[in-house]
Amino acid sequence: MLSRRKFLGASFSVCALPSLSVTGDINKSIKRYKLVADQSHHTFSDDLPSTNLWLYNNHCPGPLITANKGDVLEVFFTNKLDQPTSIHWHGIRNLNKMDGVPGLTQKAVEPGESFTYRFPLNDSGSFWYHAHNRAWEQVSRGLYGALLVLEEQNWMNVRDRVLLIDDWRIDQDGLFDQASLGNLHDWSHRGRLGNFLTVNGKSGPKIDLPFNGSVRLRFINSANARVMVFKLNDGLPAKIISLDGSPCTPFFTDRLTLAPGQRMDAMIADCSQLDNLWEISTRQEFIAARFSPVMTVPVDRGKKYSSDFWYPLPSRINAKIIDIDMRGGAMGNLNYAVFQGEKRDLRDLAINEKKIWALNGKIGSYGLNLGTISLGEVAILRVLNDTAWDHVMHLHGQHFWVKSKEFGDDAKYVLRDTYLMKPKEKADLIFSADNPGLWLFHCHTLEHHAAGMAGVISVI
Ligand code: C2O
Ligand code: CU
């Protein structure tokens, strides 16, 4: 077991889980995996007791899924939990019926039942998968894993490292803090923040690297609520080559900011320079992981990675504009909201229904249609964060262009699926609606999502 875990932390090229890859048509190989959600236990570090979590295949994080662009991914999923669940493939421009939102795109997978997810992987990049029923609970208990779709002929995967990062809340005994789940104060403020950070399921792990040459660090934030900020040792600048899976125009930064759900791929030209990864979002900086150059791997042939965006910024002439005003939460300006057709006082809604956030004056749900777009049309979600808090807005099924203020003062257009919005910020999320279906739009602070910050964009 221990060596297995070490494997996971080390290099996925070595630990890629067995999958029965059936090659038929050369361009359409099927990658098959089995995932089982179950109660399990895990040890975050040697000085902590083993704690109860809910995991896929008894692994924390869940098994790394890898495939090549153009493959079909088939996941036979079984639910051994005692509550319904589903799996969402975050960032995949998926078939709507495979998107994993119970009550919107599929029926929940009930305890004891199975469901087969099967969909084509048309884009390469860094993705992740996670439970999407009561996600505020199921994800916080550990139901997630990384999904990498490699570019064709990706010989570089020995130089790829996944850093799947979570902050858990553990109690005085070092156990998963169940009592804090569902806390109304968390739900109306920043969400349920953890107090214990892990990288690939371990506290401060050693990450093996090649002795020299380039390395690609694929960061994924799987926390419920914490916006994490990292720096490499001595502020070594990282070259960011991809955001939320899609290549971006490369830029250098010494502060890697990742909101929940977001991914960021950083290229380090010479990995022999790496020693520590620091988390610096709070006043107490600490080492999140240590890099260790120990591996002999083939020489770095300097292959170029793709820098082609999945699609260019579309023309906004004749775009369909959908206004979305976000309000609510603590210290907000929302006194009343419509819940299930009835206008109610927000305090009443908070205390009696645990609903605290509203979109366009309505408590959000999977039944709230925010707008309807014709297939092929360009759409702009004109989003105003009229609250006192950060929100991390995630659109299922497509990536949008946004003039991002996440990387310093000079805002730049980037293609993302999850965008961190500051209080009072207004942003246009621009996309060409090429993927038909009912797509969830929600805050990836999972407590905000549960408390009403969610709605549906219909592409028909
Ligand atoms: Cu990563 Cu609707 O979620
Ligand atoms: Cu939010």
Image: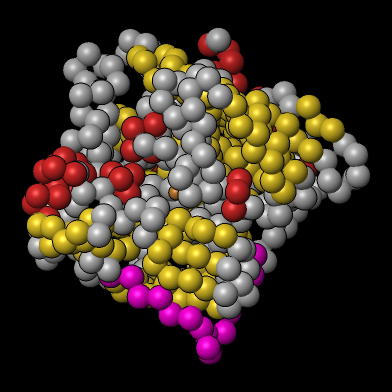
Let me know if residue 458 is in the magenta part: no
Q: Nearer the viewer, residue 117 or 53?
A: 117
Going by the image, does 71 lie left or right of 211?
right
Quadrant of the drawing holding the N terminus:
top right
Residue, x 45% and y 56% (percent of image)?
440
Instruction: Give residue 217's quadrant in the image.
Output: top right
Going by the image, does 227 lie left or right of 327?
right
Q: Residue 306: in sight, yes or no? A: yes
Furthest-right residue in this view: 25
Q: Residue 122 location, x and y as percent?
A: 71, 54
Q: Nearer the viewer, residue 82 or 67?
A: 82
Residue, x 19% and y 52% (percent of image)?
356
Q: Residue 312 location, x and y as percent?
A: 62, 74
Let me know if residue 325 is in the magenta part: yes
Q: Residue 242: in sight, yes or no? A: no
Going by the image, does 372 lie left or right of 434?
left
Residue, x 65% and y 29% (percent of image)?
76
Q: Which residues are magenta?
A: 310-326
Q: Nearer the viewer, residue 61 or 39?
A: 39
